């Protein structure tokens, strides 16, 4: 065995094993410094690295070893290097007895898994808080209607629920309460004896998740289809159709409502019992009514205690009979169509010559439609109620303007194109048999009808051999609600013309919707051999006549984020033309308030006449239109159209300068 001596070695790192006469290393080049040998019988020396960078002998297995001995020149021919100060330690148990997942798991893996689990739990807790917890920030909401007090009543319902729980009251609840309030404040424009239409947009669901509720009045089962008298020969009772208002309210509440109906009807009943101040609009309607022969019971409602002096502005209108009816419906909603209220209604009408029966009342049901008519117009989407409403007229007009393509700016030529598009669309309305005709029109990329830029066509071109529809207007009112529950609701209700049929029963006025049908001899102005009555709107049993009313919403195009807008638009022809002009102005760069306030035009088919607000003539509009062949009449004002807008979490009201009675309440 070689003698034992201390030797020193210097070393440097290498990247691979080197072969040669002087050294072979696995990671180190080792050079002998010193004299003597320190080689055991296996030609192996054991060394340990010292603090000064040299090696000295130590016990086997604790440091480095090499093999194949050393030569007399003090060089290593072959070296095998072991790791210095290995972190491995002798174990006291067999690690392979533990589960594989435990052996493979590191401390870092455990930390990461724990953090992921923690994040998942926090996320679930936040979702639960958002869905069922009280809101941390008071949500925003807005209510727009024809009357400030009614808008406030609807908003207070939403404000009360926002302080507690969102589910306590929905936007539809607020719309119902606001509408009931309007029934009390404006009995000449709508109520239990009428009908209407509603659109509900649910923002938190997939894009354009719209629901339409159609509660238009319906003709009795015993309706005479062979009617051949003039419109003026129809009696008040014969003009009444089966009312749909309450059925629509019940349908909407069943789908979207939360507050008990009894609660909503009791609030309206209290208002009717205590009395309301006569507003300017109702005072004007009463003044116009004085010249008509009106029934004694309606006279009693609209006069003071002497039963002779008609109510004026700021007088108090009390309606105890209506309050009793509202309370009865609140206790039992079936009382209207099949109970005591319904029986009293039918009895009153049949005594006056109506054909409405209790079976007609029992069989009435509002309809629900999810395939709502929509039109993409530039960067917005316009949704509107379908037939028998006038919503398709609005969409048809915009569709024709869209095809025309000339809408980079709003000028006198734009007014002309709008008038022409309205004429064509009113002509289409008289011929649409059902919704499939409307869809075909909206989906068609081409049309034989073209707007002339240099003039107008004859009446025959627009009417196409069909008498234009002669529809009542003036007895309708709107409600739009944008709530914190991500619902946007717009509804229009009415009883036809102002004060409807003037038949009063159980405290509310009945409609005159039967006069909206077409029939032979209705309008002697038209020669039936040249212009036939509308076949699609021809009078028939169990049928809903065409309506001048419509409900419309503006929505974002191809997304859920963006502009939402609802309206309060009064009067048939001016309402449609007003909406068209606001939309066109808005999409050509005007701000919303300017779009609402700017001068407007309107078009009617009976008479075939164009109307322009006097303020529009500052740009020479009247002479421009007359030069193209339009028959123009100037007017001080062409209806009122206010707007309620939702954009990026903010709700804004844009009141029409023509009538500041339209007020939205916002919080």
Image: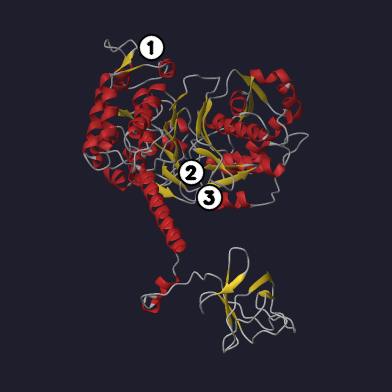
Q: Is residue 378 visible?
A: yes
Residue position for label 2: 388
Calculate the distance from the C-alpha at mark 2 to the C-alpha at mark 1: 36 Å
Calculate the distance from the C-alpha at mark 1 to the C-alpha at mark 3: 45 Å
Q: Nearer the viewer, mark 1 or mark 3?
A: 1
Numbered disc 2: secondary structure: loop
Tell me where residue 505 appears, x and y as whole percent: 28, 30
Is 380 situated above or below 147?
below
Identify the disc placed on residue 433: 3
Q: Quadrant of the N terminus?
A: bottom right
Tags 1 and 3 in contact by the CB under 8 Å rule? no
Q: Residue at x 58, y 63 (%)?
A: 51
Tell me where residue 388 appears, x and y as whole percent: 48, 43
Is residue 170 shown left or right of residue 464?
A: left
Binning the other alpha carbons within 10 Å of mark 2 as few (below 14), some (14 to 19) or many (20 upward) gives many
Residue position for label 1: 312
Q: Is residue 532 visible?
A: no
Numbered disc 1: secondary structure: loop
């Amino acid at each position: 065995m070689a003698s034992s001596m201390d030797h020193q070695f210097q070393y440097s790192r290498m990247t691979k094993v080197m072969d040669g006469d002087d050294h072979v290393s696995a990671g180190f080049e080792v050079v002998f410094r010193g004299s003597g040998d320190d080689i055991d019988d296996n030609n192996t020396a054991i060394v340990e690295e010292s603090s000064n960078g040299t090696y000295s002998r130590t016990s086997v297995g604790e440091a480095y070893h090499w093999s194949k001995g050393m030569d007399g020149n003090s060089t290593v021919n072959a070296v095998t290097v072991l790791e210095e100060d290995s972190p491995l330690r002798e174990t006291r148990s067999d690690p392979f007895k533990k589960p594989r997942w435990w052996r493979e798991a590191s401390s870092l893996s455990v930390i990461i898994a724990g953090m992921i689990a923690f994040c998942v739990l926090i996320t679930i807790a936040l979702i639960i808080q958002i869905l069922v917890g009280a809101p941390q920030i008071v949500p925003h909401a807005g209510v727009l209607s024809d009357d400030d007090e009614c808008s406030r009543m609807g908003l207070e319902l939403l404000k009360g629920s926002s302080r507690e729980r969102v589910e306590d009251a929905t936007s539809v609840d607020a719309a119902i309460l606001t509408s009931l309030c309007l029934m009390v404040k404006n009995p000449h424009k709508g109520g239990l004896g009428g009908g209407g239409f509603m659109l509900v947009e649910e923002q938190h669901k997939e894009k354009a998740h719209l629901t339409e509720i159609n509660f238009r009045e319906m003709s009795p089962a015993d309706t005479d289809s062979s009617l051949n008298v003039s419109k003026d020969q129809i009696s008040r009772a014969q003009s009444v159709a089966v009312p749909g208002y309450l059925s629509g309210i019940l349908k909407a509440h069943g789908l979207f409502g939360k507050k008990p109906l009894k609660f909503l009807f009791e609030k309206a009943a209290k208002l009717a019992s205590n009395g309301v101040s006569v507003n300017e609009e109702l005072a004007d309607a009463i003044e116009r009514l004085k010249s008509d022969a009106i029934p004694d019971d309606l006279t009693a409602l609209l006069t003071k205690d002497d039963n002779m002096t008609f109510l004026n502005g700021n007088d108090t209108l009390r309606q105890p009979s209506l309050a009793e009816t509202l309370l009865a419906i609140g206790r039992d909603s079936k009382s209207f169509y099949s109970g005591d209220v319904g029986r009293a209604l039918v009895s009153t009408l049949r005594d006056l010559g109506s054909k409405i029966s209790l079976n007609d009342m029992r069989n009435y049901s509002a309809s629900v439609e999810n395939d709502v008519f929509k039109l993409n117009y530039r960067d917005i989407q316009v949704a509107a109620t379908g037939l028998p409403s006038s919503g398709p007229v609005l969409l048809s007009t915009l569709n024709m303007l869209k095809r025309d393509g000339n809408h980079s700016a709003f000028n006198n030529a734009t007014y002309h194109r709008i008038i022409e598009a309205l004429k064509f669309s009113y002509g289409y309305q008289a011929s649409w048999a059902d919704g499939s005709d409307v869809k075909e029109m909206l989906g068609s990329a081409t049309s034989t009808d073209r707007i002339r830029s240099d003039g107008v066509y004859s009446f025959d071109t627009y009417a196409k051999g069909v008498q234009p529809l002669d529809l009542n207007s003036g007895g309708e009112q709107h409600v739009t609600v944008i709530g914190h529950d991500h619902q946007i609701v717009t509804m229009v209700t009415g009883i036809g013309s102002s004060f409807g049929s003037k038949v009063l029963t159980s405290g509310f006025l009945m409609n005159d919707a039967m006069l909206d049908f077409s029939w032979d001899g209705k309008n002697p102005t038209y020669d039936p051999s040249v212009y036939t009555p509308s076949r699609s709107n021809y009078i028939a049993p169990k049928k809903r006549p065409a309506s001048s009313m419509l409900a419309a919403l503006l929505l974002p195009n191809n997304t859920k984020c963006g502009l939402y807008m609802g309206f309060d638009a009064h009067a048939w022809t001016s309402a449609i033309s007003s909406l068209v002009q606001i939309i066109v102005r808005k999409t050509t760069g005007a701000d919303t308030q300017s779009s609402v306030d700017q001068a407007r035009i309107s078009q009617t088919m009976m008479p075939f006449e164009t109307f322009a607000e006097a303020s529009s003539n500052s740009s020479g509009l009247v002479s421009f239109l007359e030069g193209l062949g339009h028959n123009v009449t100037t007017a001080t004002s062409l209806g009122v159209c206010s707007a309620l807008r939702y954009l990026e979490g903010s709700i804004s009201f844009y009141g029409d300068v023509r009538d500041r009675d339209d007020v939205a309440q916002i919080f």
